[in-house]
Amino acid sequence: MAKEVAGFIKLQIKGGAANPSPPVGPALGSKGINIMDFCKQFNARTQDKAGKVLPVVITYYADKSFDFVVKTPPVAVQLLEVTKQKSGSAEPNRKKVAEITWDQVKAIATDKMQDLNCFTVESAMTMVAGTARSMGITVKGEFPGKN
């Protein structure tokens, strides 16, 4: 018989750096989940992506056990990594902070494809370009996809 799902917890944690301090400890502790057990499993699974911010969805069950799925880093974090910026623009419509090429957008889109709700790389590229635009990052050149 399948376990009864009690709920989900969504967190963003740096890879290989989960510890019982906030936000991990209070989020898991309030649901009665073993915090250290989660931290050990998460750190073991993400040690190759150390330092990158990773979204994680934790499914916890009525018997206090849990499963978790680690997703790819958010598009905004990947864009900042590519442009070597500390943060996006405070006024993205007036002040542009960086430029990227469509090849860089395509690389991010193919990496993030499994977590996006689209079927083609071209539509994923438009999603990434939209995130870049809202951060004050300009995409150079003409869109290479089919219009």
Image: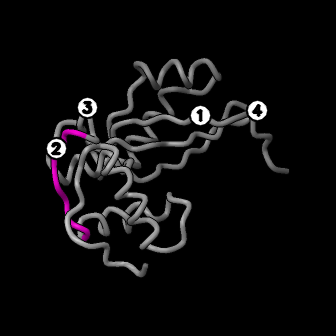
Disc 2: CA contacts within 10 A as few (<14), some (14-19) or many (>=20):
some
Type of the residue with mark 1 = Ile
User: Residue shown at 56%/60% (left/top)?
Assistant: 117
Taking 6 as reference, is 45 left or right? left
- Which labelled disc corresponds to residue 62? 4
Question: In the image, residue 135 lies at what x, y percent?
Answer: 29, 43
Question: In the image, residue 142 lies at what x, y percent?
Answer: 26, 73
User: Residue shown at 57%/19% (left/top)?
Assistant: 29
Mark positioned earlier in the residue sequence (1 or 2): 1
Residue placed farthest to the right in the image? 1
Mark positioned earlier in the residue sequence (4 or 1): 1
Type of the residue with mark 2 = Val
Question: In the image, residue 90 lies at what x, y percent?
Answer: 25, 31
Figure quadrant of residue 7: top right
Q: Which residue is denoted by mark 3 in the rendering?
A: 90
Q: How far is disc 4 from disc 1 in space, using C-alphas?
A: 14 Å
Q: Which residue is denoted by mark 2 in the rendering?
A: 97
Q: Nearer the viewer, residue 5 or 125?
A: 125
Disc 1: CA contacts within 10 A as few (<14), some (14-19) or many (>=20):
few
User: Residue shown at 74%/34% (left/top)?
Assistant: 6
Question: In the image, residue 72 lies at what x, y percent?
Answer: 41, 53
Mark positioned earlier in the residue sequence (3 or 4): 4
Task: Give the magenta range.
Answer: 94-102
Q: How is the image coloured?
A: one colour
- Which labelled disc corresponds to residue 9? 1
Q: How far is disc 1 from disc 2 in space, using C-alphas?
A: 34 Å
Type of the residue with mark 4 = Ala
Q: Do the residues bearing badges 3 and 4 touch, measured as CB atoms within 8 Å?
A: no
- Which labelled disc corresponds to residue 143? none
Type of the residue with mark 3 = Ala
Q: Do the residues bearing badges 1 and 3 touch, measured as CB atoms within 8 Å?
A: no
